[in-house]
Amino acid sequence: MTDRNDSLFDSARSVIPGGVNSPVRAYGSVGGTPRFLASASGARVTDAAGREYIDLVASWGPALLGHAQPEVVAAVQNAAARGLSFGAPTEAEVELAQLVTERVRYGDARPIERVRLVSTGTEATMTAIRLARGATGRDLLVKFAGHYHGHSDGLLAAAGSGVATLALPGSAGVPAPIAAQTLVIDYNDPDALAAVFAEYGDRIAAVIVEAASANMGVVPPLPGFNRLIAETAHAHGALMILDEVLTGFRVHPAGFWGLQQQEGEQYLPDIFTFGKVIGGGMPLAALGGRAEVMDMLAPVGPVYQAGTLSGNPLSVAAGIATLRLATPEVYSRVDASAARLAAALDVALTDAGVVHAVPRAGNLFGVAFLPDAPRDYAQAQAQESFRYAPFFHAMREQGVALPPSVFEAWFLTAAHGEDELAAIESALPDAARAAAAASASA
């Protein structure tokens, strides 16, 4: 009998490019048929054939509290009853912006004074770059190989995530003169950072960096590297854009920046970008920073940005509810669960004789089939990635849904309880043995 997922994928490919609306969903790097999800609740998802899985994707991060958290759902339902979209300001937009400015702080440091709501992470980073260019009067942008900042023109050079999964060096359709405005350097390399500013310093508008890289696998910044980026950029009159679309409000109440402040690494980015958790699973993103920079945006300043659905009331309602419910206790619970599963993953792979590392950045973690955790894109790409597909499918056969790419982080939620954690731990040894038996020529 044909599996419902197979028939849906056949139908999807006849009307949707590749059968999916975002490339990594196509299972290109792991093989097999994508699971079409029908519902989700707490820590579990159910596919179109009625099979339930313990979820370690969490909608690629937004489901910090768990899927369909009742208070978040109720907030969206209440907002929907009042209207789906207005194209006008709402009181809730102000409340969410205030929440962001209140959360992103540490001691006397409050780097966000203004917030602009948009709809997607790509839109947030695109706007942040335009804003940086407008504020500095410069054109060049520095990014790091393997860092993913959305799919706008100029940002797909040596990007991670789906681009790494598909082994593409960039993207067709991006004009060469636009790509030439982006300078790509190695991550976690102070010498490369110094060299690019030595040559182009008076032409660089900004450096954009993932707060902790999680699109070439989890590759955290080396101690002091994010601070060095800020210091170097500021010394040359450039800005630092800290991309927290993935890490923002997931690894700490104040994002990865807050986690680093807590750990003693103090620096001040000029612009932050947020997505995922800020919308609680609804389409919402934001950029924020100090007033003198943010007020360059229209209608106050000359840098134009607009969007009919920016600050959509349903998304804003989900974001407010999520941030208010994301208490210190929630972060402690997710942190503890991540530490437990990262340790179990390490033990299972060690026992199976698989060369590996389990890199972590806060409560984000993943697997790298290397003897040491990668520190840059070249090292991440050099791993024995062929081991991941059998590992992934062995976990799925035991009812655990992992990200369908070795270049993605694993995400836990506050809804993962003892039953879910124990089941994941029980599934790991078989998956580790499948990875051990894998062959590059298979």
Image (cartoon, rainbow, N blue to C red):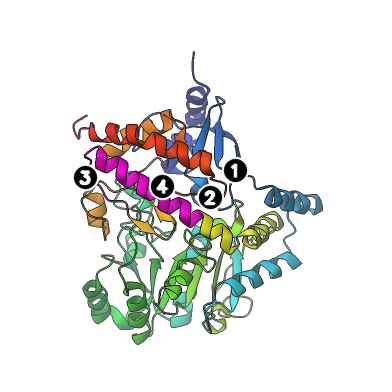
Look at the image and give the residue range highlighted in magenta: 334-357
Q: Secondary structure at mark 2?
A: loop
Q: Position of residue 56 (x, y in %)?
A: 47, 44
**Mark 3 and mark 4 residues within 8 Å of each other at the beta carbon:** no
Q: Residue 285: horizontal and vertical position, in percent?
A: 57, 61
**SS for tag 4?**
helix
Tell me which amino acid carries mark 4: Leu
Residue beneath the point at 54% across and 80% down: 110
User: Is 196 placed left or right of 302 in the picture?
Assistant: left
* Disc 1 and disc 2 in contact, CB within 8 angstroms: yes
Amino acid type at image mark 1:
Gly
Q: Residue at x 33, y 35 (%)?
A: 429
The foreground one among 150 and 327 is 327
Name which residue lies at 70% across and 70% down: 94
Point out the frontmost of discs 4 and 2.
Answer: 4
Q: Which mark is residue 413?
A: 2
Q: How many discs mark residues in the rendered view?
A: 4
Q: Is residue 265 above or below residue 337?
A: below
Q: Is residue 284 visible?
A: no
Local packing at callout 3 (Cα closer than 10 Å; few below 14, some 14-19, many 20+) is some
Residue 99, numbered circle: none
What residue would you read off at disc 3? 355
| Location of residue 161 in the rendering, given as x and y in whole percent from the top left corner | 38, 50
Q: CA distance from mark 3 to mark 1?
A: 33 Å
The tag earlier along the polypeptide, 1 or 2, is 1
Label 4 or label 1, whichever lies nearer to me, is: 4
